[in-house]
Amino acid sequence: MAYNAFENFLAVVDKAAKAVGMDEQDYIAIKYPERELKVSIPVRMDNGSIQVFEGYRVQHSSSRGPCKGGIRYHQDCDINEVKALAAWMSFKCAVVNIPYGGGKGAIKVDPSKLSKSELERLTRRYTASILPIIGPEKDIPAPDVNSNSQIMDWVMDTYSMMKGYTVPGVVTGKDLDVGGSIGRPEATGRGVMIITLQLLKKLGIDPKGVSIAIQGMGNVGSVAARLLYEKGCKIVAVSDVSGGIRNANGLDMQEVLAFIGNKQRFLKDYNADNVEHISNEELLETKCDVLIPAAMENQITKDNANKLQCKYIVEAANGPTTKEADEIIDKRGIILVPDILANAGGVTVSYFEWVQNLQALWWDLDEVNEKLEKIMVKAWNELDDVANKNHLSYRLAAYVVAIQRISRAKKLRGIFP
Ligand code: GLU
């Protein structure tokens, strides 16, 4: 049977709640999405023909505030994936305790196959289709896999044109010139770096020389690689969609990142002394201290969890590990910091962007980075406490924190009517 990310989410929710003796009645109202919208998006292509794309927006929870979460452009996305991604957003925002629920959108498309003007028409029509359910006080989209600041700028403009005035707070991850926040592009990778250093600190390990393998060189993986490299870590392997490169003595990350540039070149074409080419599967099985999956869901599964040669996993992607793999990882004594904390830096600075937009006030980079660090470190300490007190893995502890926070809000507000 095909992997169903939302079923995976539900199973972990039940397991975490059970581990701390919660009754299903205490949290049943927060398991399922509040709203699921599916749209057909007709686009006039450059050659004059019309193509219809499928799009989604799922709002998992608005109990703690407006829904929040990215829009993914990917040829393989489906509704169950978007439901899981939306739910993970609610849980993520609860873990870092920012006043949001969770949502997620997606368009089933490979954007690299579209021209820039086709991409713009697709984005604007998708925005118009989901317009009734988004807004700065309802649901605030952001970038995700294969979407970027230009796409967010079009979302903002389309929404604003329909309203008749500029509404920067409808979407985050915009360019600076149209209300984006300084520090947002690198925030997710920065958060991954902050959490990796917190984990190492707790274990009494000096980051200098710690070996790290990173799957995915998109916005998240490449920034995490750069920042951890700058902290003196040894990046032994990295990969992108074309495959990976490895050097047990450490890659020259400055050179590798310069080679990739702005996604113009692929790692399969990178060559240097003592660098071997590997597959994405081999990357995951690379001998290292810290493995950072920073690509897609469903990468660490029951089929490869026994082959991992890392001591720690910091999940930069959303949902890279299945629940069966989690159990194997636990048994093997590999410590895993889950996605809903490790990659929460992005949505945290999105929250800062939205706050700045609502106040029409700009913060500087130091202020953004200091506030980000403060929120991430506090969330890490709270998670560590819950894990230790209840003898839980960090995954289950993070779910416990989220379930408790969201269900408390739900209980205080009461069930309408
Ligand atoms: N797409 C990112 C995530 O999965 C960021 C979401 C946001 O900033 O709203 O966390």
Image: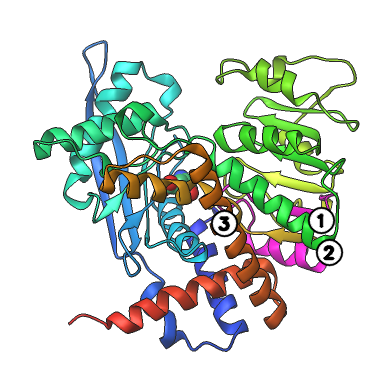
Height in image: 6 above or below 76?
A: below
Instruction: Give the quarter of the figure containing the C terminus.
Output: bottom left
Specify whether tag 3 is near ligand 1 (CB below 8 Å).
no
Disc 2 vs disc 3: which is toward the camera?
A: 3
Q: Who is closer to the viewer here, 229 or 90?
A: 229
N-terminal label among 3 and 1? 1
Instruction: Give the quarter of the figure containing the N terminus.
Output: bottom right
Q: Residue 350: x, y in percent?
A: 41, 46
- The structure residue drawn at horizontal position 46% and vertical position 38%, both measured from the top left corner, is 364
Q: Does the magenta stretch include residue 261?
A: no
Height in image: 123 above or below 269?
A: below
N-terminal label among 1 and 2? 1
Q: Residue 278 appears in which quarter of the rendering?
A: top right
Tell me if mark 1 has few (under 14), some (14-19) or many (20+) residues whose alpha carbon lies within 10 angstroms of its own. some
Disc 3 vs disc 1: which is toward the camera?
A: 3
Q: Give the range drawn in magenta.
A: 308-333
**Is residue 70 found left or right of 163 in the rendered image?**
right
Q: Mark 3 points at which residue?
A: 374
* Numbered circle sitting on residue 332: 2
Tell me if mark 2 has few (under 14), some (14-19) or many (20+) residues whose alpha carbon lies within 10 angstroms of its own. few
State if disc 2 and disc 1 touch (CB < 8 Å).
yes
Q: Residue 216: x, y in percent?
A: 64, 35
Q: Residue 271 appears in which quarter of the rendering?
A: top right
Mark 2 residue element: loop
Q: Residue 289: x, y in percent?
A: 84, 48
Name the residue type under label 3.
Lys
Name the residue type under label 2.
Arg
* Numbered circle sitting on residue 306: 1
Q: Who is closer to the viewer here, 267 or 47?
A: 267
Distance from label 1 to label 2 (Cα)?
8 Å
